[in-house]
Structures are given as C-alpha cells and as structure tokens.
C-alpha cells in the first residue's frame, strides 16, 4: 500500500489490492480529519487460556501503547489455534483529528482482546456457545428427556444447584434458555471494543492531547461473514448483482430524537435549565405562552397540541432538520468516540451524556451467495453520502467496474477515486459542482471499495 499526501485538488490514494481500495480528499479544512485503517489480523489464544475456568485475579488494564499480544499482520502466521480476520475502518473526526487518529490505531486491538477470550468457542462450530463459559453446551439436549423420572421438586432443586448423585443425569429445567449464536459473540466483541475505546480516549486525555471526537465505521470479515459496526453518520452498502443492500444506519439528532428526548426527560439536570426535551416546529416566542402549539415528545412519532408554558421557551434539545439538525445547538451526530470535553457554547453544560459510543452491528453471510468481480462493499464517510444517494453510488461504481478488465487489481482503486471525484465535483465560477449543477461536497470525503468475490475463496 502507498500514500500520497496532497490537498483537495488532488485526492489521496491508498491501495490495498486485491482486498480493497480507499480514496480520501480534504474538503472543508487544510488538514484531513478523516482517518482509516486496513489490516489483516491474527487472533491467538492467550497463553494459559482454557475453556476451564481458572480463579485468578483480574488481568491488569491494557496500557495505551498495546504490545500487540495476540495481534499479527501476516496472514501466514496463523496456526490451527488462531483466527484470522480482515479489518477495515473509517473514522470521521470533528473539532480536531486526535480521537480519529487514536481510534484508527487502537480499536482493532480492543476487538482482538475480546475475541481472544472466546476463540475456542468460535472455532467449535458443532455446538452453540455454552451459557456458562467452560461448561459443555447443553443446547443439543432434547426437551422432555428424563422428565418422566424426575419430580418437579427434584428438577427445581437441580436448577438451584442442589447436590445430586454422580450417576444421576442432569435435571431438566422448567424455564427456557436462549440459544446464542456464534455471530452474537463477534457482535458483542465489537460492541465492547467500541465502549473500551471510548473509555480509553477519556482516560488518556488527561495525559495526551487527544482533540475532538469522531464517528466510527468498521468492518470485520471473520469465518465467512462480514460484521459491519457503525457509530455515527457514515454509511456502508453492498452492491450485489446491481442492487443495493444497506449495511448500516446513520445516527443523527433526527434519527435518535426519541432516545435523546427520553434521556432529557429522565435526567432533566443534564439540560442545565437551558433546554427543553420537547420538540416544536419552531422556536416558541414569549407572546405565545398560553396558546396551543404543535409539539411532540419521546413517546410520539406524530404531533399534538399543548398549551405553551414558560418552560417551553427554552431551546429544544433537538433542533433543526436534515444536516442542520443539532443536539443542544452544537453537534450533528449522536454516536461516536471522544467528545468528552464538549460543552454547549458559553456554558458549563456537557453534551457527552447524550452521545453514545455503542455501534449498531449488522451481519452479512458471504457464504450464502456467489459474488462476481463487480460485487462490492462500499464504505464512506458523510462527505460522500451528503451529495450522492445509494442509487447514484451504485450506478457510478457498477458502470465504472463494468468498463474495466476483471483481472485488473487496480480497478477498485480507480473506482474509489472516480467515486470521490463525483462527490467533490468540478471547480466552476460558482464553486464546486456535481451532476445537474448541484453543490459538491464541502466535507472530507473518504471511501473504501471492497470486492466480495475474494471472500468466497477464503476457507
């Protein structure tokens, strides 16, 4: 892979052939706040780890400079007790690139740590994950066995852990037990990794200069499946047979209005006496106190009328529409990493309590489909999707790839560069313009184009 560091007039290219291609350009600032990562990672079982529980003190918290234990970058370094996964990630920074840089270097290490603890469970496809780690999974047991020979009292005693004869078969329980799939363990590892990454940024801000915050979109390819984790307003789609399959949801003040309003309702002290959790079609004026005005709260998707009171004169917690929607008139995304010091302008009201670092994880099974050379996963920051729809991206990528030699490994690099050029537009008298004289993107633009056909060739 290689880098070229240039300004907006020339995109930055990173080639990861044949796995993927990424193109970045700086839009609104002299420095690009977008960061990215692409790695082949080997997860090894920790020395001494076993499915048999060992009563030892909890391991020390990992340092800020990971020693790489359990993580490798050479695909051929894996062994029979290891797992290999491919990792791609985009981080869209704001108010500085510090959080985005930190996450691009460390998030995959947190994912590895959580996968290490369940590596033996993930490798055993024959049975579902056991409810109690280290015990044999009992999900294959057929309900009803032994029930005729056990009384209800005996079964309940067994469920409570009462002693029994070594020859007595384990009693059947009268309550159901969820069957957890292997996918859920990978999803949980990614979700916990995001939370730990956010906590690490908060902790190390006391020592290092980690500025701002960032959205995070990452993809893990493991055991024949793609796991797409998103916290923020970036987006991932799959283009298969010329059709679009959405793989993520954008988290904005509008899409998470009800969650934000509910938090403001339950913990009004977070509003600092300056904001109201209610939403109105526009700002309420003092002369309208006592009149009936349209509103909605966290329980509503529709609208109703209420009598305006003095408290309704406060600024709405969620205000604006589309890309202009803001939380506390400050930030336009509701999930991501960092932003621990972010406050409302000229106040002591922290915004972080309303921001979530938890990602939504979506799973796509590559083994269920045959993928051709033009079937790809497209990841992009909001600088791309603000000006191009899913349909336009699909048409752009599909048309470009169809005109390339299927054996050309750089076709994905060129497709990514072409996609960024379309979003950036052409400089004219009235600024940067794209198709139909629409404004080009004024934000940083980053994207990955990842071919899916190689996934079908993995063991």
Image (cartoon, helix red, strand yellow):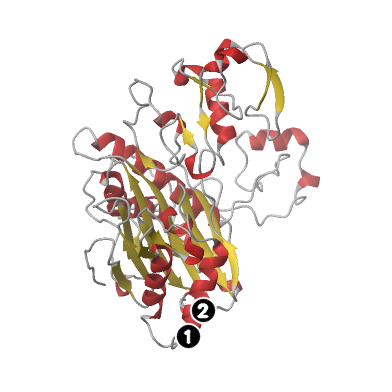
Say which quarter of the image contains residue 115: bottom left
Q: Which mark is residue 399?
A: 2
Q: With respect to residue 233, does 388 lie above or below? A: below
* Location of mark 1 (residue): 403
222 to 27, vertically: above or below? below
Q: Closest to the observer: 436 or 107?
A: 436
Q: Is residue 324 visible?
A: yes
Residue placed most toward the observer, 458 or 181: 458
In the picture, residue 192 is in which quadrant?
top left
Name above or below for residue 51 compared with residue 394.
above
Q: Locate the N terminus by quadrant.
A: bottom left
- Residue at image position (35%, 26%) is 345
- Tell me which residue sits at (68%, 54%) in the image: 141
> Does residue 4 appear to the left or right of 215 in the view shown?
left
Circle 1 Cα neighbour tier, 10 Å, few/some/many (<14 / 14–19 / ≥20): few
Can you say whether 403 is above or below 183 in the image? below
Residue lying farthest front? 429
Residue sitting farthest toward the right:
148
Instruction: Residue at 38% x, 57% y: name it.
Output: 430
Q: Nearer the viewer, residue 142 or 369?
A: 369
Instruction: Give coordinates of residue 160: x percent, y percent.
Output: 63, 33
Q: Are marks 1 and 2 in contact (CB under 8 Å)?
A: yes
Left or right placement of residue 55 versus residue 304 in this view: left
Q: What SS does tag 1 mark?
A: loop
Apparent side of residue 17 relative to residue 274 in the rendered image (left or right): left
Picture mark count: 2
Image position, residue 298 (x, y; %)? 62, 29
Residue 71 at x, y percent in the picture: 30, 60
């Amino acid at each position: 892979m290689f880098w070229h560091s240039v300004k907006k007039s020339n995109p930055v290219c990173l080639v990861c052939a044949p796995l993927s291609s990424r193109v970045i350009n700086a839009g609104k600032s002299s420095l690009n706040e977008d960061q990215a990562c692409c790695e082949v990672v080997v997860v090894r079982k920790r020395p001494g780890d076993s499915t048999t529980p060992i009563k030892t003190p909890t391991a020390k918290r990992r340092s800020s400079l990971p020693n790489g234990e359990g993580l490798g970058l050479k695909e051929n370094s894996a062994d029979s007790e290891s797992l290999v996964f491919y990792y791609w990630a985009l981080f869209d920074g704001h108010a500085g690139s510090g959080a985005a840089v930190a996450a691009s270097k460390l998030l995959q290490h947190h994912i590895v740590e959580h996968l290490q603890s369940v590596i033996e469970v993930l490798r055993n496809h024959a049975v579902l994950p056991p409810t109690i780690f280290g015990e044999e999974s009992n999900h294959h047991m057929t309900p009803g066995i032994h029930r005729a020979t056990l009384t209800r009292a005996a079964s309940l005693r067994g469920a409570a852990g009462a002693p029994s004869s070594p020859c007595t078969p384990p009693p059947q329980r009268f309550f159901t037990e969820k069957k957890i799939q292997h996918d859920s363990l990978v999803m949980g590892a990614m979700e916990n990794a995001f939370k730990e990454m956010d906590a690490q940024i908060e902790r190390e801000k006391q020592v290092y200069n980690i500025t701002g915050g960032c959205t995070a979109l990452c993809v893990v390819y493991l055991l024949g499946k793609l796991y797409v984790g998103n916290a923020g307003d970036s987006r991932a789609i799959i283009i298969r047979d010329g059709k679009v399959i959405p793989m993520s949801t954008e988290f904005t003040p509008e899409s998470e209005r009800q969650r934000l309003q509910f938090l403001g309702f339950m913990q009004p002290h977070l509003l600092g006496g300056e904001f109201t959790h209610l939403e109105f079609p526009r700002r309420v004026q003092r002369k309208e106190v006592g009149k009936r005005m349209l509103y909605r709260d966290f329980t509503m998707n529709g609208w109703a009328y209420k009598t305006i009171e003095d408290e309704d004169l406060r600024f709405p917690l969620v205000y604006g529409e589309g890309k202009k929607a803001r939380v506390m008139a400050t930030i336009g995304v509701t999930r991501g990493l960092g932003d621990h010091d972010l406050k409302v302008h000229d106040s002591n009201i922290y915004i972080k309590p309303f921001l979530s670092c938890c990602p939504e994880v979506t799973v796509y099974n590559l083994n269920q489909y045959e993928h051709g050379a033009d079937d790809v996963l497209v990841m992009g920051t909001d600088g791309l999707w603000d000006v191009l729809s899913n349909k336009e991206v699909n048409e752009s990528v599909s048309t470009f790839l169809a005109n390339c030699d299927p054996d050309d490994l750089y076709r994905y690099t060129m497709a990514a560069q072409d996609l960024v050029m379309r979003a950036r537009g052409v400089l004219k008298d009235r600024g940067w313009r794209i198709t139909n004289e629409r404004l080009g993107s004024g934000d940083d633009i980053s994207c990955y184009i990842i071919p899916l056909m190689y996934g079908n060739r993995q063991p």
